[in-house]
Amino acid sequence: MSHQMLIAILLLSPLVGFILNGVRFRSSNYLLAGSIATGAVAVSFACAIALFMQLVGLPPEQRRLTVSFFEWISVGSFKVNAGFVVDQISAIMILIITGVGSLIHLFSIGYMHHDKGVTKYFAYLNFFLFNMLILVLGDSLLTMFVGWEGVGLCSYLLIGFWFNDSAKAAAGMKAFITNRIGDAAFIIGMFILFMTFGTLNMHELNGLAPTIMESSWLGAVTLGTLMLFIGATGKSAQIPLYVWLPDAMAGPTPVSALIHAATMVTAGVYMIVRLNPLFVVAPNTMMVIAIVGAATAVLAATIGLTQTDIKKVLAYSTVSQLGYMFLAVGVGAFGAGMFHLMTHAFFKALMFLGSGSVIHAMHEEQDIRKMGGLKKYLPITHFTFVLGWLAIIGMPPFAGFFSKDEILWFAYSSPRGHILLWIAGAIGATLTAFYMTRLMALTFWGSSRVDKSVHPHESPLVMTIPLMVLGLLSVIGGWVGIPHVISEFVGHIPNFWEHWLEPLITKLPEASQVAHSATEEWALMGVSVSLASISALAAFIMYTKKAGAADKVANAFGPVYKLVDNKYYVDEAYFGVIINPLVSASRDLWHYVDVNVIDKATYKITDLVRGGGSFVRSLQNGNMQQYAMYVVLGVVIALSYMLVG
Amino acid sequence: MPSTSFLTDISINHYLILSAILFSIGMAGVLLRRNIIVLFMSIELMLNAVNISFVTFSHYFDKVDGQVMVFFVMTIAAAEAAVGLALAVSIFKRFKEVNIRFFEHLKG
Amino acid sequence: MTADVFIFWFLAILTIVSALSVVLMTNPIYSALSLAMTMVSVAAIFVTLQAYFLAGVQLIVYAGAVMVLFVMVLMLFDLKNELQAFSRGKFTGAIKVGAVGILAGLIVGAVGSFIMAGKSGAPVTPEASTSADATKALSEHLFFNHVFGFEALGVLLLVIAVGTVALSRSKGGTHAKH
């Protein structure tokens, strides 16, 4: 099949699924809805594999399959095609999206079977995938933006899926509005880039990227990329716009796995990697990205330490891991960022689905303080969750180890890296190990604190199969990008990942001032792994062996603990500084300006019109003789004008 | 002396002024009378005034067209009187009323 | 003072007086009779203007047919002397009378300023023509130059006749009967 056809099917299959489920959205036949949706995504996945194979068959320089379905906008010299491109970067993305997506769809059949809105749910999910595919395949920023908005919409719909609960509906709105702030910046970024380069096509933009570094903060490329990055902080939940993602956990758990862990939230990273030649020439932007990424990684990890909701812990973990990805792209390690994006998609989707399985087993209980000892009730979930846990805390040879280690190495060794960035990353990794172990310990290990009325049970096969597949991927997913030093050590295993992405990644122009030796890399690797191991062990002991130890630590840190427990009061600060003043200012505008000025003005106008109307109506009173009189008066006026004038 | 010449020399002006006066009287009737039949009569007066003008012009400029127009006007006037009176009869049969003010209620 | 002048003034006064009585009489029958008088004097004015045929038509159509129509309808209604012959409302009434008066003045003024300044200085003396010549000229003009208008009038009269019959057959009113 031609690649045009494949791309068309890839894109349209979820759309067809959406329409098929969308037109019968009242149905509660979960098996039919789930089969349609999962089938649609599976077809897309098959197309993605076929496209990937075609790409592999081409020589590395020509690995770029494009298709342009129609001319979408044509205004003067401004032209945008509905064009889509499959190259090395987007091929990986579509594989992740459709692959993980089909597993999550499959899982959803089991998870959502009791829900009345199941058909609507699957329709949204398919629509999300359609938009996500447009986002990653679009060949211009505008096409990407269509998908960008589309996934935002689907995210909103799915977060607020149980909209009868006003807190959940509010969470959806929060996500939507927060994203909107980022989107505005994204649009401004597009304007700036279009003004500077005259095109929005990403391939052309990359080709037009200047070769000279832009040192000024106010350079067009710096401003444009900075704006795009602000857009990315909205979509990918970075400081300062990360606040929506933890609340987004109000949605069904598979949605959290698909949208808020594996795919949509990585869109910002993907966008930056896609435009890496532009970002490379804007070192200031890169610096901002790296700092924001590192800060987010640490901040979110600390918040994760104190959360008691199983999904909230995972949500902050996601924010933190996204911070790592931005740290990677910020120091110029675009390949490492994409690599972590992929492995994170595997293990975080796995853990979210695992948490879904737990929640399912616990009858919608999400508080980990009321769990414990679930290991014996949920053997498969527990086993796969352990794989995910090992992957996220970076134990070799699990997937997370390779990607996270590469990021940390680049944070240190890249010309744009810094030892402080590495330290932040290492602290984040240590904290990650701690809170993930805490999650494991409180949920699966130790003594049971499960309520008597709840009888945990292992989930059906339709839910455990995706867990197993993702568990396998969490183990082996990192092996495609084994770092140089390790492959030297164990024998010549090529680093597929680097070779694959190489043609699209711009090398940093600055040469590294210091030559970094393999010993250094080994040393850093050892430090981060041992830090993670120690903190994981500490958490294990604190939360399983020594009951009450955790409270002691919490009491010892007193105010700091309270600060972290309340998520640094960021939400409160946003409310106090931005939202409440905005609301009260709007209310004042309404009470004083709107009521007194605008309304009054319109009322006066209507009074005038009404008065004029009633006057004219009084002339139209049906009295023929009066009409005749008006005629006579008119004639008199006309005649006197003729005679006098 | 203009006054005697005005009295003795009958010109086109005399006829036109007569026509104007007749027209104004008819119009006053239309505006002031309440009986619909008298109203029609006043309209006939106005039409006759116009006819006088036409015939006057026809006579003084020696063109027959004015008289043709009078012919047409008469026909229309007769037709108008027929229809108007038929309407008046029709309304009178139903409401027993010829006052023009009463017809305000027919405006719908 | 020639006979022509005397006849004009006589007819003019007769016309105006009878027209005034049409408007001012409170009994519609008197109005109708005054109207007949007006029609006859207008016909006489036509004669002084040498429009003999039109004078005849005026007598037959107006003083004959139309007047019969009016009188017959008045008889049908059996109307007595009216208590309120004129519209109520002194203010609008004043406006109406004033408007009509100003209009008359304006027309007279217009006639004076336009015509007197132009041709009226030398009264046109049309060549004397016999009644037969004038009528022949009129008929030729009518049937050669204005034959379409003539035919259209014929159709109009037919429509009027049908409409009048239809109106008189209806029970009156446009609303559904209860």
Image (cartoon, grey):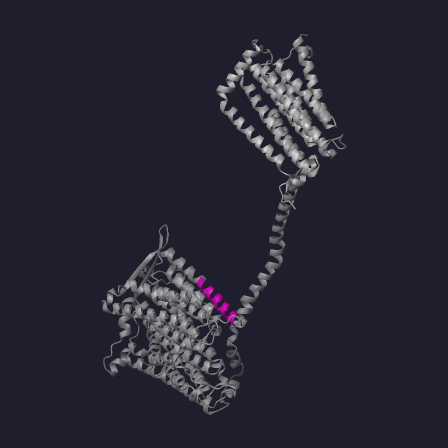
Q: Is residue A323 visible?
A: no
> Would you place residue C173 above or below residue A276 in this image?
above
The main secondary structure of the magenta stretch is helix
Residue at image position (30%, 72%) is A512
Pick whichever, C147 or C163, lies toward us: C163
Q: Nearer the viewer, residue C115 or B42?
A: B42
Which quadrant of the view contains residue A217? bottom left
**How many labels, in total?**
0
Q: Residue furthest front?
A: C169
Read off the magenta span: A168-183
Q: Within the magenta stretch, is there residue A173?
A: yes
User: Given the current orientation, which residue lies at the most extreme bottom position?
Assistant: A545
Query: Where residue A406 sits in the image (x, y, percent)?
Result: 33, 77
Quadrant holding the N terminus of chain A: bottom left
Q: Is A517 positioned to the left or the right of A583 in the image?
A: left
**Quadrant of the image for the C terminus of chain A?**
top right
Residue B106: give x, y in percent of width and height.
65, 40
Expressed as whole percent of the image width and height from the top left, the position of residue A441 reads: 44, 87
